[in-house]
Amino acid sequence: MEITENAQLAARLLSVMQNDILPLTEKGVAEGNKVFGGALLRKSDLSLVMAQTNKETENPLWHGEVHLLKCFYESPVSKQESTKDMIFLSTHEPCSMCMSAIAWAGFDNFFYFFSHQDSRDSFAIPHDLKMLKEVFGLEPGGYNHDNAFWRGRGIFDIMATLPDAEAKPLLNQAQRIRDHYAQLSDSYQESKDDNAIPLN
């Protein structure tokens, strides 16, 4: 099923971030985890299948996206829902491990709110870009956003194509989400030395 990148999609992705992922991330950060999270939505009606957040204090591989996939496949819903019929929402542009996991799980898409540069500059978490550079020799943005596995798009890229009247309320909501994540980032940075995450 084709995904239409329009105001309705952007609004729904922002709503899921604000109402479904952020509350989980607040709890996760309180436990010492990073601010990354994700959600699965049905392409057919944009309804929520599942939301999750980072659990690296439990296992350093449980990035927001990978932990979401773990929980999905441990749930009965995975027997009823096909990944080809779902949208993958990531709060932050996925790292190389998470991009691969999204492909291995059979998704043909992902959408993200914060970019790799945001993770480095606004969240003081440079590992995504460093991994892409050191392991794959890629500069920021250097991976193929359209490839044989999936199409990766930023939510802000969608909003940039919208008429001002449609974009303005979405951009206002996006700023509120940014502000909330900035607070959570401060909390994480203050406590990160207390956990055992290898790349904190």
Image (cartoon, rainbow, N blue to C red):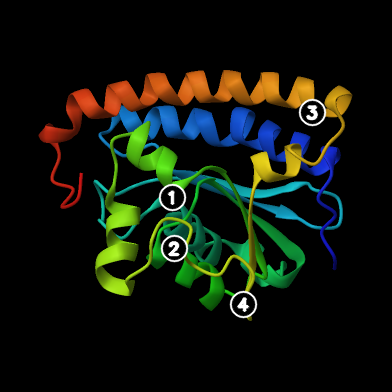
Q: What residue would you read off at disc 1?
A: 64
Gap in angstroms between the C-alphas marked 4 and 2: 13 Å
Q: What residue would you read off at disc 2?
A: 98
Label 3 is placed on what type of residue? Answer: Ala
- 1 vs 179, nearest the viewer: 179
Of tags 3 and 2, the one toward the viewer is 3
Gap in angstroms between the C-alphas marked 4 and 3: 29 Å
Gap in angstroms between the C-alphas marked 3 and 2: 29 Å
Of tags 4 and 1, the one toward the viewer is 4
Gap in angstroms between the C-alphas marked 3 and 1: 27 Å
Residue at 30% over, 39% down:
33
Gap in angstroms between the C-alphas marked 4 and 1: 20 Å
Q: Are marks 1 and 2 in contact (CB under 8 Å)?
A: yes
* SS type, badge 3: helix
Q: Which quadrant holds residue 186?
A: top left
**Which of the marked residues, 4 or 3, is nearer the chain's N terminus?**
4
Q: What residue would you read off at disc 4?
A: 149
**Which of the marked residues, 4 or 1, is nearer the chain's N terminus?**
1
What x and y, as percent, mark residue 142?
A: 47, 64
Left or right relative to 124: residue 23 = right
* SS type, badge 4: loop
What x and y, as percent, mark residue 185?
A: 34, 27
Mark 4 crowd level (few <14, some 14–19, many ≥20, 10 Å Cα):
some
Label 2 is placed on what type of residue? Answer: Cys
> Which mark is on residue 167?
3
